[in-house]
Amino acid sequence: QVQLVESGGGLVQAGGSLRLSCAASGSIFRIVAMGWYRHQAPGKQRELVAIITPGGSTNYADSVKGRFTISRDNDKNTVYLQMNSLKPEDTAVYYCRTASGITDYWGQGTQVTVSS
């Protein structure tokens, strides 16, 4: 069983920065990819923001490239999302996700609100 707990969301003005954290329980953290997703509004699908492999390779949605950075600390079982140059359209609930076998694990989400 894996539990994911996000933190670090909040209200920030456009152009500002936030760092999200996702702490993972369980022993699989070092061997699984970790991803950040966001849900921007009712009726919209949850979208992938960034993903990081166990080896540290990363991939980003086009909308956040150059502004967001995903990283992981395997000693702390934690994955981070550094968000810079935030825009109002980045407003969303941000979720941490991983998978093991056929099981998906999601955190409870953390709200990020960017004011114009």
Image (cartoon, rainbow, N blue to C red):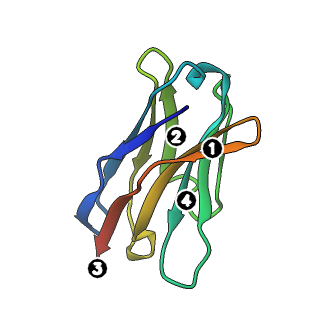
Q: Which mark is residue 51?
A: 1
Residue with the most extreme right position: 102
- The residue identified by callout 2 is 70
Residue nearest the observer in this picture, 13 or 72: 72
- The residue identified by callout 4 is 64
Asked whether the beta carbons under mark 3 and mark 1 sit within 8 Å of each other, the answer is no
Residue nearest the observer in this picture, 31 or 88: 31
Amino acid, disc 2: Ile
Asked whether the beta carbons under mark 2 and mark 3 sit within 8 Å of each other, the answer is no
Q: Which mark is residue 116?
A: 3
Name the spot of residue 96 as percent of width and height, x first: 50, 47
Mark 3 residue element:
loop
Q: Which mark is residue 61?
A: none
Name the spot of residue 85 as percent of width and height, x first: 38, 59
Residue with the most extreme top position: 75
Q: CA distance from mark 2 to mark 4?
A: 11 Å
Q: Residue at x 46, y 24 (%)?
A: 77
Asked whether the beta carbons under mark 1 and mark 2 sit within 8 Å of each other, the answer is yes
Q: Earlier in the sequence, mark 2 or mark 4?
A: 4
Q: Earlier in the sequence, mark 3 or mark 4?
A: 4
